Amino acid sequence: MYEPEVGSKKELAIILSKLKVFDKPKIRLEQYPTDSEVAADIFWDMIMRDIIQGKHVVDLGCGTGILGIGALQSGASHVTFVEVDEAALITLRQNLEYFPDISDDRYDIICSDIKTLNSLNPNAKKADIVIMNPPFGTRDEHADLAFLTKALELAPIIYSMHKTTTLQYIKTWISKKGAEIINQKDYEFPIKQTYTHQTRKIMRIEVSCLEIQNNNKLVK
Ligand code: SAH
């Protein structure tokens, strides 16, 4: 039985706030870490609704790992981390070392572009949930759609974060694919302006987390 390692949303937020983030974020890859309070809110809701316990979760574009690690802390049985940037994966491995209780058979780390990811580790169970904070597509147009396309190939339930200003487009795209948005949570996403040299101003952008039911992958 896999149970959450945490007793409250606050406790989860504190644990996740201690994780290392991108050392030198790459603009090209839109490397913005998910805020720990936002991640804790998403996972606490999943815990309360008994959605994540014992599940195999895929963290697409995992970066330094806050979502996959959050999933493991919330009771997921297994996480597959997928990321194209080897430097981010070095930090992910350091973050995983903070959790000696997470045995290494509970996760796989795959260094790959999500577009060319053909399969998960054949020993891992089929994916139940994809969770991701994909590039918003501001650099590489429609990078977010490439992530959604891959997520729809992988799992029956997808949690995906999108810039609220792009939501209408994303929602239409999702419904054309035969998937359904069953929940939406809106956040003010704090983004540290680490790209602009010395200044470390915090900007806020509106981001929505969509819970998508992938009718093509539901067990009938
Ligand atoms: N999931 C992390 C990181 C979000 S930022 C978090 O929530 O904190 C988006 C991540 O997607 C970055 O780590 C970036 O390197 C990765 N990424 C961007 N394009 C990618 C691609 N084509 N394939 C795999 N990973 C990609």
Image (tube, rainbow, N blue to C red):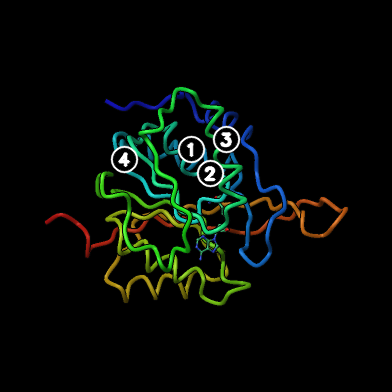
Q: Secondary structure under badge 3?
A: helix
> Which mark, residue 213?
none
- Place residue 91 in its image quadrant: top right
Image check: 206 left or right of 70?
A: right
Quick check: marks 1 and 3 in contact, CB under 8 Å?
Answer: yes
The amino acid type, in three-letter code, at marker 1 is Ile
Q: Secondary structure under badge 4?
A: loop
Which residue is depicted at the point 69% across and 53% down? 191
Quick check: marks 4 and 2 in contact, CB under 8 Å?
Answer: no
Question: Reading the chain from its start, which is encountered first: label 4 or label 2?
Answer: 4
Q: Residue tagged by mark 2? A: 65
Question: Reading the chain from its start, which is encountered first: label 4 or label 3?
Answer: 4
- Place residue 149 in its image quadrant: bottom left
> Which mark, residue 69?
1
Q: Secondary structure under badge 1?
A: helix
Which residue is depicted at the point 82% across and 60% down? 196
